[in-house]
Image: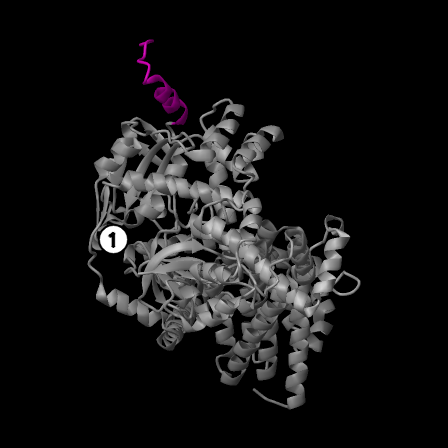
Amino acid sequence: MVHHQETSEAQQELLEALWQHEEESRPIEWERFSGDDKQDMVRHGWLSEDGHALTAEGKRQAAKAIRRHRLAERLLSDVLGVSDLAGEQEACMLEHSLVEGFAERVCTFLGHPRFCPHGHKIPEGACCLEKRSELDAALAPLTRFRPGEEGAIAYLATGGDEELDKFLSMGIHPGDRVTLVRKSPTVVFKCGNSQFAVDRELAAGVYVRRG
Amino acid sequence: MPTATSQHESPASTARQTTAKRLFLVGNPNVGKSVLFNALTSSYAVVSNYPGTTVEVSRGKLSLDGGEWEVIDTPGMYSLRPITEEERVARDLLLRDEGVVVSVVDAKNLPRLLPMTIELSLLGRPMILVCNLMDEAETAGVSLDVKALSAKLGIPVVATVATKGAGLDELKNLLVAQAAVPARRIDFSGSLRNASLVIEEALDGASTSRFVALLHLEGDSAAAQVAPIDPATLARAQALLGDARPSAVCAEVARQFREMASAVLRSAFVQGMGRASRWREKLDAVLLNPWTGFPILALVLYLGLYQFVGVFGGQVVVGWLENDLFLSHINPWLSALFADYVPWATIRDLFVGDDGILTMGIRYAVAIILPVVGSFFMAFSVLEDSGYLPRLALMLNRLFRVIGLNGRAVIPLILGFGCDTTATMVTRVLETKRERIIATFLLALAIPCSAQIGLILGLLGGHPLAMALWVMTVAAIFLVSGTMMAKLMPGKQARFFMELPPLRWPSIKNVASKTASRMGWYFLEVVPLFVLASVLVWIGNITGLFPKVIAATVPVMKALGLPGEASKAFLFGFFRRDYGAAGLYELQKAGKLDGVQLLVSAVTLTLFLPCIAQFMMMKRERGWKVTLIMSAAILALALSIGWALNQLLDLSGASL
């Protein structure tokens, strides 16, 4: 066991909070974190000496932690059907058990999602960078289908809420069978006896199970 | 009068007494509500093969045995959770007014569309389900058991082909028999059920309480207006849903409606093998493939816009009406008539003078404008009914995203080439305020209406280079100002999402009645303004005000390198943009403008302030503040671009 799994959950949370503060400019509640935790992280070389900024290594570790958290959220909301806000606690618990290799497996299983259910970006992992070669993964966004290919919608992982709503209110739901008709100039797909045209960005959020 | 009624009958008959006279046609866009509306009533709603063309609620009368019905055609919506403004209008109307709800669905897509009918049933109103487009459903291999469907839902169900009138008698018979009843009450499951019950109890079980409860849980702003509840109750209900966010509640609600719908359809709807139409699929592929699609688009524009509207409408018909009818027969006859019977010169001038109501106002409206607008509306109707416009939207989506819009904006923008006023109203089909403002601005600035195009084609006809420069300048201004607007306007880019209706053969009857109705609307809107313009000019002339205003604006014209007389054309231009172009036309005929001046004035006038009708429509749709800011910007842009163009041409020493 060489990797740094001995960090405490509080330290992980500090990492995540700092990352969100630096990358997504979200406010940070310093008082939630103890001085000891900070000292520990400085010693790991993850935090700058003043304890207020991430080092390069710290940033790398933080991105991993964020990635685990958001993958856990996706897993809960899309696969286990736990509504996202209520799932926050569970997500935290699940997150800490997603060890390195396991997170990759979950990410691949989910089809390398790009956003968490709240619409925040999920940092890419090694598996996401390799994914371009595995075009025939069981689960892929509609944009990676070839014209004529079909499958059943596994879940809608669009960036914002309104976008997701659009699919649902047009009557396009997880479980529905879709066939990709064309990708350019705009994505066109068939669902039931109708055809729909959508932006690439929207289509990239429709995860479809092949076959 | 019988006093005793059996118990199960009384609630229904109470409902009948209060609601028997009103009927709402509700459903998705493009399922045939407007066709049904026209078939049922003697009034006319514009029908097209393009989602979202009903932007206003149409009302009509239907006389049946046993009384008159008011039929209301609502804008199409995909659910009772409105995304666009038109959907909101329709939803609020349904919530407010009692009446029979006729849910119209596209039969071939029932699994996708029935959930909305179930959602509608929560309103507790008497309902009828109309499964329309049965012919297309059959081709698609769908077989539908109407009886089973009716039994499961607890409401009458009719299968129709509204365009051919099939099934309409059955629908009317159901109305006469007052067969519409509230649908079987539905129950949610799981925590949604519990949460909804908490709110329903607080609402004292009114007939729409379950629906209102959903609105509250989904965080819809209308909920508080319809039936406010105590925040503590709402919080209690939300806690039962694990404090899920509204969007998550919406998803759960949609899922449950969907489950109920598939339970209902299990035995009633069977999807078999369709008879795919090979030529239709091939044609669709050719239209959508960029390599073939864009040349086809160019051909459509050339034949439809240039040859049919520009040459046939703008030259052949205009020439006939203007020269052979008005100038050689009607005007001399009117002048002679007035000379004989009206002794006062001032009054004669008002009616038959150079700018008279009859000799100029009506002549311009009928002889110059109407043929152009009429042929445009006809060409547009053919495109609309064929289903080509949504395909166009798809192809132009990328271009439109550059200017902060998306493919959806194709309908208002293309319609603007016909009449910018109508198009400004149709910006309602756009989803966000940001898009509506950008589209309204571009319509006012850089989209010339067909009357204007017709006149400018006439104006620049003998100067092909000037015409090419006009097209390029206006197109460049359209793109540059659109791109700037996209950068300046706050808010994010709305995503493109559109259903592509099947390609259909346009019906001559529908094209004809649609063109007639749009021309009628246009005529009613336009003629009074032409008359008003004539009257104002007359007043201006006799009071001496008009010559003064013209004199005051002469320096502006001079700065643009134009003769002083052009200021009259620009001033008129505000009453109608095309009217201004018509003024220039007269100047050109009199040989007072050279090529450069023609180009500068054509560009300036194209960009110049919208006509008064469009101005009033902008005010109605966007409000005073936005309209005034836009108008000031447009005035400044038009004059400064005209000035710059003149300087540039002057420097280059070009003669056009």
**Residue B16 colored in magenta in the image:** yes
Q: Is residue B268 left or right of residue B578?
A: left
Is disc 1 placed on a helix, strand or loop? Answer: helix
Q: Where is residue A99? Give x, y as percent.
A: 53, 59
Give the residue at mark 1: B136
Q: Is residue B172 left or right of residue B573?
A: left
Q: In which quadrant is the C terminus of chain A drawn?
A: bottom left
> Callout 1, which amino acid?
Glu
Q: Quadrant of residue B256?
A: top left
- Image point (36%, 24%), residue name: B16
State the extent of the magenta-drawn residues as a range: B1-19
- Image point (31%, 69%), residue name: B285
**Residue B87 colored in magenta in the image:** no
Whether residue B70 is situated above or below residue B630 in the rendered picture: above
Which of these two is toward me, B178 or A194? Answer: A194
Q: In this orientation, does residue B49 appear?
A: no
